[in-house]
Image: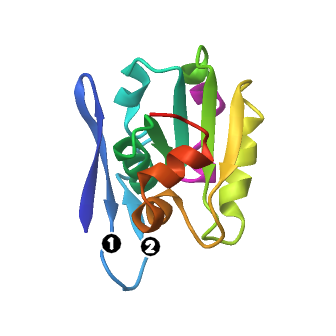
Amino acid sequence: MLSIPYLTRSGVVTLRFRRMGDGDGPKYRSVPGDPPRIFNANALLVPSDHIAICEGEFDAIASTIAGIPAVGIAGVSAWKSYFARCFKGYRAVYILADQDDKGQGMEFAEKVAEQIKNARISPMPAGHDVNSFVLQDGREALLAQLEIKK
């Protein structure tokens, strides 16, 4: 399994694990008893008038590398209403909705958007999440979709 560190200014606060390749059991695992957390919380410290929220760590990494500061949430059930406070003060909060699943990406986006005043849902193209979209079409395509000029 690949270990995914959740870093903050104070250091690593938890780890999640992703199974590599095909196999039995869940694709992701968390430390037993660990509460839901925001992945890449340090993105909240980057001076920017916008930020993205992604469903998943790898999508947040892809968005950040593309030039859009992003955090990741580990699925619909991991979103907690108190997370919304972190996104006050941004001109735009982009919720990058996966379209490579059975509707969970839009369910996640709609749940989050209900709680963030300045949220803008941006669905990825059919069959893609943020990571696969950026890998296929490049960072410019993601920036263009969000109408962000760099």
Name the mark on residue 19: 1
Crowd tier of the residue under label 1, counting other residues whose Cα lies within 10 Å: few below 14, some 14–19, many 20 or above: some
Q: Position of residue 118 (x, y in %)?
A: 71, 25
Residues 93 and 143: in front is 143
Disc 1 is placed on an element classified as: loop
Residue at the image point whose x is 38% and y is 52% from the top? 32
Q: Position of residue 41 (x, y in %)?
A: 39, 31
Name the quadrant containing residue 81: top right
User: Which-is-in-front pick, marks 1 and 2?
Assistant: 1
Name the quadrant containing residue 2: bottom left
Residues 136 and 103: in front is 136
The image shows residue 76, relative to residue 90, as above or below, that is below
The image shows residue 140, relative to residue 91, as above or below, that is below
Disc 2 target residue: 26
Which range of residues does the magenta coloring cover? 75-84
Verify CB contact (< 8 Å) between mark 1 and mark 2. yes
Disc 2 is placed on an element classified as: loop
- Cα–Cα span, label 1 and label 2: 8 Å
Q: Position of residue 4 (x, y in %)?
A: 29, 52
